[in-house]
Image (cartoon, rainbow, N blue to C red):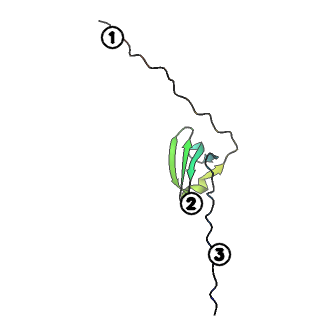
Amino acid sequence: MALRRRPPLMASKPPFAQGAQIEHAKYGLGSVLSCTEEYIVIKFDDHGEKKFVLAIAITALKKSDRQPPVEKRRSTRKKVAPVAAH
């Protein structure tokens, strides 16, 4: 009896690419920062960064065809402390 060989396991591609625009049912629109077979990290417009277990969160995510938001740059001007009156 010959042993049947299984085909080599192929590394599966994560369902969401880095930079993909997504919409979450609770947190709204966001950008994928990273995605592996286990976790997805998303930076939401109004809720900051969140890390999810992909198998659980995938049902709450859908791809969005919006353009990525422009990153807000912080002001380079130094804030001057008010001078206390004597």
Residue appearing at x 58%, y 34% in the figure? 71
Relative depth, front residue between 42 and 80: 80
Kind of residue indicated by mark 1: Ala
**Element at label 3:** loop
Quarter in which the C terminus is drawn: top left
In the rendered image, which quarter is residue 19 located in?
Answer: top right
Kind of residue indicated by mark 3: Pro
**Earlier residue among tags 3 and 2:** 3
**Disc 3 and disc 1 in contact, CB within 8 angstroms:** no
Residue appearing at x 69%, y 41% in the figure? 66
Kind of residue indicated by mark 2: Glu
Q: In this view, does 86 lie above or below 51?
A: above
Residue tagged 2 = 37
Q: Is 72 left, or right, of 85 in this rendering?
A: right
Few, some or many C-alpha atoms within 10 Å of disc 1 (few <14, some 14-19, many ≥20)?
A: few
Few, some or many C-alpha atoms within 10 Å of disc 2 (few <14, some 14-19, many ≥20)?
A: some
* Label placed on residue 7: 3
Residue tagged 1 = 84
**Element at label 1:** loop
Q: Where is residue 49 in the image (x, y as percent from the top left)?
A: 51, 43
C-alpha span from label 3 to label 1: 76 Å
Quarter in which the N terminus is drawn: bottom right
